[in-house]
Image: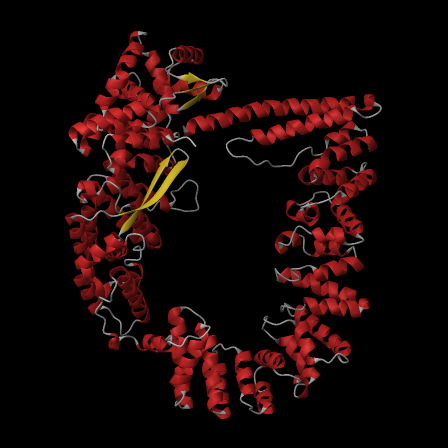
Amino acid sequence: MSESPEDLASKILTSFGITNALWHKRINNITGKNIRLAVMCAQIALAGKKYNDLINVEGVYDAYYKPFFERLISDCTDCKLIKVVAIISFYKVVDLEETSLLDQIEHVFGLESSEFKSICRKLDDLECISITDDDIATIEDQNFGTYAFYKCFYVLKELSLSNLIENLHNRRERLRDSIFSVWNCFHKKEVIDFSRSSISDAWKSLSVSIKEEREKCEFLEVFSGAIPALTFLYIKNLIKENKFDDFSHSYVNSDIILSILSNFSHSEESDTATALALIVEFLKSHPNKMESAVKIISEHWIYDDIDYANSYKRETNIIEVLIDLSKESETGFILASCVLPSFLKFSYQYSRIKGRNFVIGRYAVVITDELKTNRKRIWEWINSNIVNLNQSVLLSDLYEDFYEVKSIARKLISAELDFINDCVSKLNITEDFNVCKNLETLRQRIKAIMGKDLLQIDWSKANRHYLLDCQISKVRKQRCNRLYDFERENIAQIIKTKSVTELINFCKDIAHISHYKNIGDDVRISYVIECAFELSQESGFELWQYCIDQGLYFIPTRIISTYYSKGHDLAELVGFIGSQRLNLKSDLLLAYIVIIDNASSLVSASDFCKAIRHHSLEWFTIDGLCNRYFSAESFDNGCRSIMAALIYRIRNAMSIAGSEEFLLKFCKRHQSKTDLVKYAYISAIKSQDKFDYNHKLLKYLLQISPQFWVECCKAFPTFVTKYQIHPYEFIWDIENYSIVIESTLQYYGAMAYFPYSEKENLYSFFCNLKDDTAANFIDDMIYKYCQNSNISSIIFEIISSYMGSFRIRHYITFISSNTNLTDFRQLDLFPHSMTGGDSFAPAIKCRIEFLESLIVEIRKLKDKINYLEHIQYLTEEKESLVREYEFELKRGHKHKLYDL
């Protein structure tokens, strides 16, 4: 695999003894793919040994390009050659056959299209630009394009930069790339001042001519950093007038304000301070945007790969401004409290975008005295304001990015340990559970970094619920298979001498802990009730009833299983269950049947069916419950009552999840009740996404009632899409598949319009086909319905999308059965959509090849004279596709040139 120009340039720079990654990046940005320019920059770097010597490299460009550039000037009196090079540099890719683009060039730059083309040909002859076979003009050496743009717009001023910006402000990406490429290479005061002056002039005009504030903001989103004073004034007025509406096209989306102000992260210190102040003003009236503002600043304003070379001055300024803002308003304090801890990271994310290509990486901070001073300043602010900070959030994010930069983290934490322990001593660990939890996480992080415990934490003052949670979840040396086993043992140890009142308070504490941790409490509550039953039956029932009355969650099967294992009286348990409210009674009764063998001895069939009617659990199957409760002899009679219970649930809008196997057995035993099962099935799929997910019940119903598929489509039009179980390959395994599919075809063919949302109800049959069964069926349908335009249209939409190598065969079948050209022209030849990357050319080429093959096969038919019009129609379609193919080839080529 060949090396990229950037990799080759880096190797050359290394051979010169230049190993600094920043210098490599800077030189690559300046020289692009020009290796000779890279060598010249390397010589500058070696001579000066200063990074700043590579800020303005006009001398390098002059030495390389000036002789050729002056020859271009000498070839004309009005610098038109240079103008055209600069114009092509701006557009990057110019299609010389694109009339609208040539008209734009004439309007903006005053070059008539024929003259522009003529000059392009001349420049191509001079090897200054390149014109491809598709008549696309581009500059292969983009560095020369940047140089020409600079000379034309900045030095010679043959073309007006402000006029360019004003007239082509909607080409913001190209304006940004062109202007900032000049800044990148010719970074001097004159260039920057002229750029800002031109952007300012353009903005003054555009701010009047553009009527929609949204469009003005889109311009400032790119150029605000170049015109800070004008931008700040405009944003201040927007905030004052509150012209924000996230749902209006004409008003301003509030997020774009943050995007504009974020452009000042690398500006002059005063501009950065003003931008932050305006962000705070904006947040005062839009507090819901605080999270967005924090994300932008904490992810994109902190650190980049040249900050350490500039002594972290930018970060110092941002930190001081945020601290000042924190003293002025509550909003400023909230912003500072969320952003300042971000500067305590050990690494930062770096991203670079060039055209449609982007690079993302994560890099470690470079430790300097300035960095340490900034971090010290932040810690001082944190410790002086710790009472008012969200301590839990502060601890949860602190030092979490240490994994790949442990050595750097170790050095920085060593310097900050006193500040950290000072912070720890002020934390509210007595009242706040989550502060304790996150402090323990921080302790573990620091231990992982430093190799030992260094935090001075007085856990005796910790939150009572946190200490109890630690006691419950403590892992013993003698390991069990699961964490739950540890917790059960610990809970048993804690409550072994407690009274019922103390057990009740213990359950309250568990509920509080679950709330703090945002987890379920059912497992722990169940453990406590189980342990209570181990102490005594009376204690267990009393505690269980309390938990029920308080609405606490528990796992009934665990409790019942423990109760049974201790040999307690089952009649007492059934009596306790019977005393509960109806829904809970039903749940507990079904759990009892799952756990206890021969449950029918204490639970009547009537109570069992009533429990099926009113239960609220979905972790068991109806079939499994019936097998547990009924004997083989009594199942037949009992299942009728269960079916009645399921119908009751359906009519009362309750779930019948887990009933698929039961319904299948019921249907097989009582085929006269098939309509009842079909009713249950349709009701279930409307409310449950995964009902009958393996299609066993559906398959059986279709075998005995092939019209059932249409009934499903009528009752639930989006049933295949919503159900998410296509393709229905099993249809082809059913003996009467043809009736199922044909009836569906007739149903939708009778409609005036086949809704897009329902097409999967029919088309899903034809996915993932493996043999010619479907093709033979399709041929039969074509013979049968070739005179029915609605059904034929549906059939050929299926054929064009799904039938692959059988497509030509089916079109031949149609015209052999119906020679009417009008009917043939109404058929889909191709799917309604195409897939492609830079270009649809490959997909279009496949369509052309298909038409060519179809024409060949038609010509082989007997009575060719009957199909001459068909061939002519297909030939015209092919010619249209050929033109589209050529256009797509060119479009794809332009995209590739644009990315170079």
- Left or right, 315 with respect to 90, comes to left
The quarter of the rendered structure image containing the N terminus is: top left
The answer to whether residue 201 of the structure is visible from this angle is: no
Picture quadrant of residue 591: bottom right
Percent of width and height locating residue 135: 48, 17
Q: How many marks?
A: 0
Residue drawn at 47 percent across, 25 percent down = 894
Residue drawn at 20 percent across, 50 percent down = 319
Foreground residue, 143 or 116? 143
Foreground residue, 641 or 403? 403
Percent of width and height locating residue 697: 72, 62
Location of residue 411 with respect to 178 vertically, above or below: below
Foreground residue, 252 or 135? 135
Foreground residue, 103 or 118? 118
The quarter of the rendered structure image containing the C terminus is: top left
Percent of width and height locating residue 699: 73, 58
Picture quadrant of residue 259: top left
Residue drawn at 72 percent across, 41 percent down = 794
Tell me the colour scheme of the image: secondary structure
Percent of width and height locating residue 724: 62, 54
